[in-house]
């Protein structure tokens, strides 16, 4: 199976590594408008037999055929590049977030549906087998009706050098600048934690959000104006009546890349938390107040740890979807739904009001 990669930034190496692990999958070509990044990507990954192009247009014109293309460009280029790929008739795997805003995301959904091509968005943490089992338990009714939700995403790279020196490296600086296509912590990590919560609990009805940027107005490093949000808090009301909080920050000293999700129902609860590696997401905690239900007495509510076998990655699911000619989750429609929530967060924070989702 022949694949192409558009964009050779930081995340593209993971796409390359994951696709190369899959039998009979070959990266035929890559492209990037930054020649230095393109050559570095090819040389560092030792893929000298892979053809490199300076523009997407050139790659689409000169390459005979792709079974699919992986889009790892910065957020602001997702719509433009994706539409060109779909117009050419290729299946597409797009890095998150799907787009910069909901209107762009809708156009990408419409184009994918019209082209009748496989379309997936890389919500990475869906790969956690424990998270998948957690969703099954909630949907089975084992914890009863969801009542309260707590979802958090903690990163520390603005308060630690564990990730590298953000003041010097472009791969971090662009994430702080709206002019370079960043929607801040909300767009970078909020997209994951909202997907985590919504996929497990159900659609959000209303939201109240507060976005915070800690850099001084006009503060600049190189040609990056540091104006994107550094973190957010939000209150949410779900369609099923549950309430909760969803938040994220880049100042979480003591954590590198931590996700936490707790869902409390009227019969039990589930929680999952892991740091850095998705592989750590192969276990979660479950409790059910069965004793009180049967006897009317209080229970100690002991948490049970549940181990889960590793599951397919999104990359493997994309390849299977192409083989079977059947789309899989998370698809562009889900990406657009989450983008709509992010847009509502910006609107709520700006107006200081609850917003219907």
Image (spheres, grey):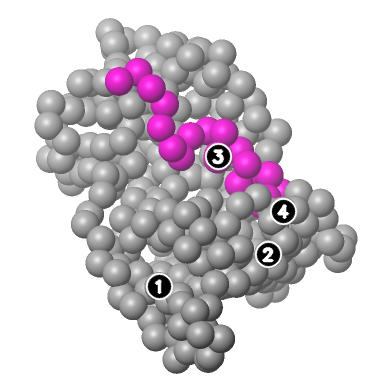
Residue 242 in picture, x, y percent from top left: 68, 64
Q: For marks 2 and 1, give the CA distance.
A: 19 Å
Name the residue beneath numbered marker 3: 334
Q: Which of marks 4 and 3 is in front?
A: 4
Foreground residue, 275 or 40?
A: 275
Name the residue beneath numbered marker 4: 239
Residue drawn at point x = 69 percent, y = 67 percent:
243
Q: Range of the magenta residues?
A: 324-347
Q: Is residue 335 magenta?
A: yes
Q: Earlier in the sequence, mark 3 or mark 1?
A: 1
Name the residue beneath numbered marker 2: 242
Q: Element under label 3?
A: helix
Q: In this view, does 43 lie above or below 59?
A: below
Report whether residue 135 is seen.
no
Foreground residue, 264 or 34?
A: 264
**Are discs 3 and 1 less than 8 Å apart at CB?**
no
In which quadrant is the N terminus drawn? top left
């Amino acid at each position: 199976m022949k694949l192409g990669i558009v964009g050779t930034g930081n995340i593209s190496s993971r796409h390359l590594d994951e696709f190369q692990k899959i039998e009979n999958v070959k990266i035929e070509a890559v492209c990037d408008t930054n020649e230095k990044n393109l050559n570095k990507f090819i040389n560092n990954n030792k893929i000298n037999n892979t053809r490199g192009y300076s523009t997407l247009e050139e790659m689409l014109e000169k390459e005979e055929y792709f079974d699919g293309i992986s889009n790892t460009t910065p957020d602001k280029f997702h719509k433009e590049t994706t539409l060109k790929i779909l117009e050419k008739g290729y299946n597409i795997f797009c890095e998150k977030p799907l787009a910069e805003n909901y209107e762009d995301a809708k156009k990408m959904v419409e184009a994918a549906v019209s082209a009748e091509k496989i379309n997936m968005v890389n919500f990475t943490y869906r790969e956690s087998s424990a998270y998948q089992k957690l969703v099954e338990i909630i949907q089975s009714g084992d914890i009863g009706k969801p009542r309260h939700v707590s979802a958090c995403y903690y990163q520390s790279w603005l308060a630690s050098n564990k990730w590298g020196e953000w003041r010097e490296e472009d791969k971090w600086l662009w994430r702080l600048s709206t002019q370079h296509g960043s929607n801040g912590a909300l767009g970078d990590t909020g997209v994951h934690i909202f997907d985590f919560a919504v996929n497990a609990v159900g659609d959000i009805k209303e939201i109240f959000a507060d976005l915070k940027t800690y850099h001084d107005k006009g503060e600049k490093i190189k040609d990056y104006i540091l104006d994107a949000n550094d973190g957010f808090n939000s209150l949410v009301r779900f369609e099923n009546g549950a309430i909760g909080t969803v938040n994220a920050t880049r100042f979480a000293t003591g954590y590198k890349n931590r996700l936490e999700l707790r869902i409390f129902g009227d019969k039990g609860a589930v929680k999952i938390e892991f740091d850095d590696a998705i592989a750590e997401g192969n276990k979660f905690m479950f409790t059910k107040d069965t004793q009180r239900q049967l006897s009317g007495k209080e229970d100690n509510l002991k948490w049970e740890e549940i181990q889960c076998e590793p599951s397919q990655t999104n990359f493997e699911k994309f390849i299977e979807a192409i083989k079977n000619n059947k789309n899989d989750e998370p698809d562009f429609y889900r990406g657009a739904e989450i983008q709509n929530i992010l847009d509502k967060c910006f609107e709520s924070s700006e107006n200081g009001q609850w917003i219907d989702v």
